[in-house]
Image (cartoon, helix red, strand yellow):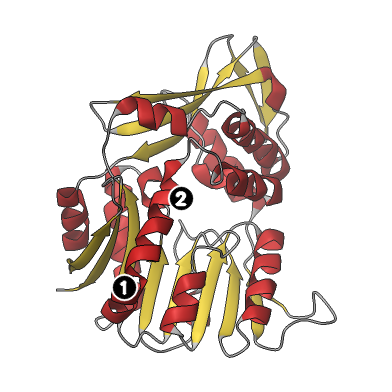
Amino acid sequence: MTLKSNLVGNSPTNLRFIETERPVIDETREVLASLAQNPPRLSPKYFYDSRGSELFEHITELPEYYLTRSEAEIFDVYLDEIAEALGSGDIIIEPGSGNCSKVQPLLERATPSAFVPIDIAGDFLWEAAATTALTHPNIAITAIAADFTQEWTFADEIPQGRRIVFYPGSTLGNFDPGAQRGFIKQLAKVVGIEGGILLGVDLHKESTVLQRAYDDAAGVTAEFNRNMLSVVNARTGSNFEPNSWQHQARYNEKMRRIEMELVAQSDQLVNIGNQTLSFAQGEVIRTEHSHKFTLENISDLASAGGMTVTHHWLDRQSQFCLALLQTA
């Protein structure tokens, strides 16, 4: 693990930036193993380099993408209740923090002593963390560039105190059900018996609403999906041609999940590591599962981490849920 301490001459004094090392060989093996599955898959973590993060921020502003607006509405209406329910949380930790915009109401209302944004896109994280540090000079910020979906080897870098993990945006839905439970268990371990998890999840709803949210008319989600191949190329030295793949999104009613895929537009050969993979025209690579939840699902997830749902809040259309999980 390396400490990035002198990135900018005028770095905020309340900001510490930590960048973890990610061995390329491990990611090459991971990608090859994922592509060997049926259907071939890639981890959603490869959505995010600086360009991917920018594209996702654009997605959140699209008219079809109701998730961000619904979650923001919950904060607008219930912020005081949420802050009261959180209590005297000293440390707010946000895995997948992106541009740090979603946490701003909590930083302003709950006034923690420290904030720990964690994101895989280091340059994007640095800019967001520096801006947040300047906006909140009384909050000590430890920004960690890391893959939070893996073991938290950086956990010792998180300040001590009562911890609240803030995990909004229904990002948990990108995990398969077993991995969802495992991740909640890991977060429960990080926060300890006095902490909590403030979890945002998208609720099950009419399929056409979901379909539009993941296949917008402007094609931003399509560009975001294809950008994953550029990220894989940069991380593994592979030679995918992103423009030779077409975005596809569909809702699997039985599994209650959106399935995003890339479809080969021609026969292709792709070099990854010391292997050459062939993809026939029409073959798909699954890039994301976005599972949708019920209130019962949320309660079951809490139980998996030895926690209970002590509070939950819904938007006016009951499309989205923000739930507070605390130790049982």
- Report the residue at 50% width, 41% height from top: 43
Residue 67 visible somewhere in the drawing: yes
Which element carries disc 1, helix, strand or loop?
helix
**From the viewer's perspective, is 86 left or right of 249?**
left
Q: Is residue 62 above or below residue 295?
A: above
Q: Is residue 138 above or below residue 56?
A: below
Q: Quadrant of the N terminus?
A: bottom right
Which element carries disc 2, helix, strand or loop?
helix
**From the viewer's perspective, is 93 left or right of 62?**
left
Specify the amino acid type for callout 1.
Answer: Ile
Measured from the top left, where is residue 238 in percent x and y?
Answer: 70, 34
Specify the amino acid type for callout 2.
Answer: Thr
- Which sits in the foreground, 307 or 136? 136
Measured from the top left, where is residue 89 in percent x and y?
Answer: 36, 84
Measured from the top left, where is residue 256 in percent x and y?
Answer: 27, 33
Measured from the top left, where is residue 50 in percent x and y?
Answer: 70, 51
Q: Is residue 158 above or below residue 72?
A: below
The dot on residue 82 is: 1
- The part of the image, by quadrant, that contains residue 237 is top right
- Report the residue at 26% width, 67% height from top: 324
Pointer 2 residue: 68
Mark 1 or mark 2, earlier in chain? 2
Residue 16 visible somewhere in the drawing: no
Crowdedness of circle 1 by 10 Å Cα count: few (<14), some, many (20+)? many
